[in-house]
Image (spheres, rainbow, N blue to C red):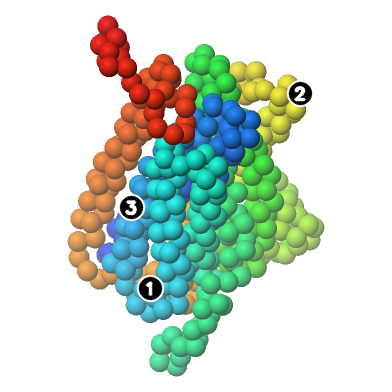
Amino acid sequence: MSGLRVLAEPFLAEPAQLLPARQQMAFTLMFHIIFVPIGVALPALMLIAEYKGLRRADAVASKLARRWSHVAALTFAVGAASGTVLSFEMGLLWPGLTGRFGEVFGIPFAMEGVAFFLEAILMAVYVYGWRRLRPRTHFLLGLPIPFVALAGTFSIISANAWMNTPSGFTVAADGGITDIDPGAAIFTSALPYELSHFVPAAYMAAGFTVASVYVVGWLRGHRDRYHRLGILIPLTVAAIATPLQLVTGDLAAAGVLADQPAKFAAMEVVTEPGGHQPEILFGRYDSATNTVHGGISIPGLDSWLAGGSTDTVVPGLSQFPLDERPSNVNVVHWAFDVMVGIGTLLFLLVVWFAIAYLRRRDVPRSRLFLYAAAGAGVLTYVALEAGWIVTEVGRQPWVVYGHLRTEDAVTRADGVWVSFTVIVLLYTVVGAATVATLRAMSRRWRRDDETPDDAVPYGPRPAVPPDAGRAAAR
């Protein structure tokens, strides 16, 4: 019966708009976040490849840079469109949030708008300029793109960090918001660890994903320089970001422990506060009895990770009222374990890659490594989505931690299930069109590899002989 109760509980939530609004926001965010790492990190990958192409007159590296820029432009467009929908949903689905706190946390959103337009302009110049600018000029005009992308990331993470650790305002006696301090609202205590945790994650996701595409080609027998560079450049970037991610992940956990102890207790599924807390892997939490069933328990490890000693006191779920605990502890805990587990596996993979590359200066030959690298792109996205689930579900029942409950921020308008259905259908079409476009680009590139004009990445394409079409047809 407890399982049925858990399944039915979300559908009994009040008001009735709360469940579809949360589902729609979650679906839109999880779709949008697929394109965010590519938008943040792929510009850096393409500039590394272009720099290599210019410095060593390497036409293969330049070709990779040009093709990655086309992928970056496409994913930027889809990511920007889906991000714009998120902005509208903030106002339509959560009027209690934007109406009361819009003047406070709206500042980072305004900054993100400026970064978005700058990135769009620079990306358009970069992609359009391949055949129209001198190589050095083209490269220099592309250099600001990764930094503008990071500025946009800073803005969005700042807004999210504010929702987790709100500051920069005063609540008046009548409940109104006064004394708004933009600096304090932007630079909250959660910003450093959220930002430092997400940026390496974006570079990991982009690096492993791009590399996995070329690893699949390598496994299919395309063992040429084009695929070799397509593996080594992004995989090297991912190998640098992965250890950083583990360090910043530990800092983020310490920050959550200090700022949001209820979320930390849910992440680690700690039932009672105290020292000598075990690290419980997976298992099932029962909110009715405040107990954990099953799972793998490692004695003292949670306290040691939290404070460097098994005596470290860790908060437990029992010290928080039921209506102030995360609404679904199991989702938060499992997502946290999935994120950490995948991060650990990817760290082992990059250690393997580093050792193998230092020995041979080439792509590792082991097929086990290649199969693992081929799957790493998907795994990083699973970890990325799991991380956002921890952040967002773990903050519940608060939309603004300690100040505004999610149920008080949601719209009272009808038709949210309808809008949710429309969004699912629309994004399914957009996602399918994006995949189809990427596949069409890949097929065209394979055809271009068989023609001599694609070997020249800069300047106008060579003139095509008048009988080239008839010759190709024959």
Indicate the secondary structure of the residue bearing disc 2. helix
Q: Is residue 415 above or below residue 453?
A: below
On screen, residue 28 versus residue 313, left or right, reads left
Q: Name the residue that disc number 2 marks.
A: 359
Q: Is residue 367 above or below residue 378?
A: above
Indicate the secondary structure of the residue bearing disc 1. helix
On screen, residue 348 versus residue 386, left or right, reads right
State the residue lying farthest toward the bottom. 173
**Identity of the residue drawn at 34% across and 77% down:** 99
Given residues 209 and 398, the one toward you in this image is 209
Q: Name the residue that disc number 3 marks.
A: 81
Q: CA distance from mark 3 to mark 1?
A: 22 Å
| Mark 3 crowdedness (10 Å alpha carbons): few <14, some 14-19, many ≥20 | few
Q: In the rendered structure, which disc, 3 or 1, sits on the residue that comes first in sequence?
A: 3
Disc number lying in front (3 or 1): 3
Three-letter amino acid code at the position of disc 1 = Leu
Given residues 3 and 425, the one toward you in this image is 425
Q: In the rendered structure, which disc, 1 or 2, sits on the residue that comes first in sequence?
A: 1
Return the mark for residue 204: none
Asked if one can make out residue 239 in the rendered structure from this viewpoint, the answer is yes
**Identity of the residue drawn at 58% across and 32% down:** 53
Given residues 115 and 415, the one toward you in this image is 115
**Identity of the residue drawn at 67% across and 34% down:** 350
On screen, residue 107 versus residue 415, left or right, reads right
Three-letter amino acid code at the position of disc 2 = Arg
Return the mark for residue 97: 1
Asked if one can make out residue 396 in the rendered structure from this viewpoint, the answer is no
Q: CA distance from mark 2 to mark 3?
A: 45 Å
